[in-house]
Amino acid sequence: MVDNPSKTVEVEAKAGKTAAVSVDFQTGVLEVRIEAQGQRGTGIVIVQRGSKRIGTLGSGVPARLSAGRYEVVVRLDGEERRFAVDLRPGQSRLLRAQF
């Protein structure tokens, strides 16, 4: 997952016993496609949450992220496009950045 989510769960472990732990990460898939003059382009896709940079994606590469709100910054040949993206659990989103 791009944003490296983590959860802490308290577990009491007793000698000779096992303890089952279940953790559910609410995730979705985001894919950004860069298009320049009607053709697929190659640029840089930066995913941010608040002021924190989460990661960098390639155009057309699906990425699994925790559900939530992100800012996606797409750069191509000195130009930039910004998008606000809300990703819900189980959702697959395709974002087209046209230059």
Image: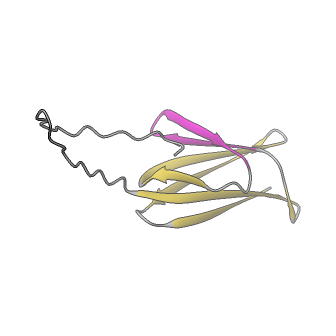
| Residue 54 in the figure: left or right of residue 66 | right
* Residue shown at the point (54%, 66%) measured from the top left: 92
State yes or no: residue 48 in magenta.
yes
Magenta span dominant secondary structure: strand
Magenta residues (range): 44-58
The quadrant where residue 33 appears: bottom right
Q: Nearer the viewer, residue 69 or 24?
A: 24
Q: Residue at x 64, y 56 (%)?
A: 62
For the image, the number of numbered tags is 0
**Quick one: which residue is furthest to the front in this view?**
16
Q: Is residue 89 above or below residue 75?
A: below
Q: Horizontal placement of 80 versus 92: left or right?
A: right
Left or right side of 58 for 55:
left
Place of residue 95 in the rendered image (x, y in percent of width and height, measured from the top left): 64, 61
User: Viewed as shown, does residue 71 lie left or right of 66?
Assistant: right
Quadrant where the C terminus is found in the figure: bottom right
Chosen colour scheme: secondary structure
Q: Which x, y percent locates residue 69?
A: 44, 52
| Image quadrant assignment for residue 93 | bottom right
Where residue 84 appears, as percent x and y from the top left, is 53, 53
The residue drawn where x is 69% and y is 54% is: 61
In the image, residue 47 lies in the stretch drawn in magenta:
yes
Location of residue 2 by image quarter: top right
Q: Eyeballing the image, is 96 above or below 63?
A: below
